[in-house]
Image: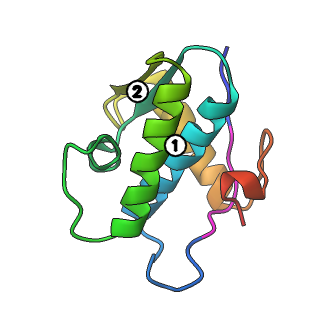
Amino acid sequence: EETAMCGPLKVGDDEVELLSNNTAELRGIIVALRWALRDSRSTVLRYDSKYAAMMTLGEWRPKRNKALVAEARKAWREAHAAKGGRLWMKHVKGHSGDRWNDRADGLADEGRRGTRRSGADSAFGWA
């Protein structure tokens, strides 16, 4: 079963976190992990941003967005533990015709236009 969410992105109030592709990708993973934490099923998060995934998993060290990366790592640890390890991340190549990546890109475009879908509320970091 597919769950799809989108909405305008809320960035940090202190202006340290500037809106960029990288911060949007990290925010997307954080939102997905918060959703996964609330859902009891096994979950696969598909990503095309190696930056966001490797930062979230602790494989790469952040030079910027350190607080945001720490938030993503915490969300990963909490969701992974709550699911008893039944949470995975799978890379999909961007702009390759992959149906999941095309779906994510479409949702990102909707969110940029202000559309909200499927439970988008402040608990998930929407504006």
Foreground of the two, 124 or 22:
124
Q: Residue at x 26, y 45 (%)?
A: 58
- Give, as a three-letter code, the residue at label 1: Asp
- In the picture, the disc for residue 105 is 1
**In the image, is residue 23 above or below residue 29?**
below
Foreground of the two, 67 or 127:
67
Examine the residues drawn in magenta and state their main secondary structure: loop
Q: Earlier in the sequence, mark 2 or mark 1?
A: 2
- Comparing marks 2 and 1, which lies closer to the viewer? 1
Q: Residue at x 27, y 50 (%)?
A: 51
The quarter holding residue 62 reads: bottom left
- Residue under label 2, please give it: 97
Magenta segment range? 5-10
Q: Residue at x 28, y 71 (%)?
A: 64
Q: Residue 105 lies in magenta, yes or no?
A: no
Residue 38 lies left or right of residue 119; in this view the side is: left
**Placement of the N terminus among the 4 image quadrants:** top right
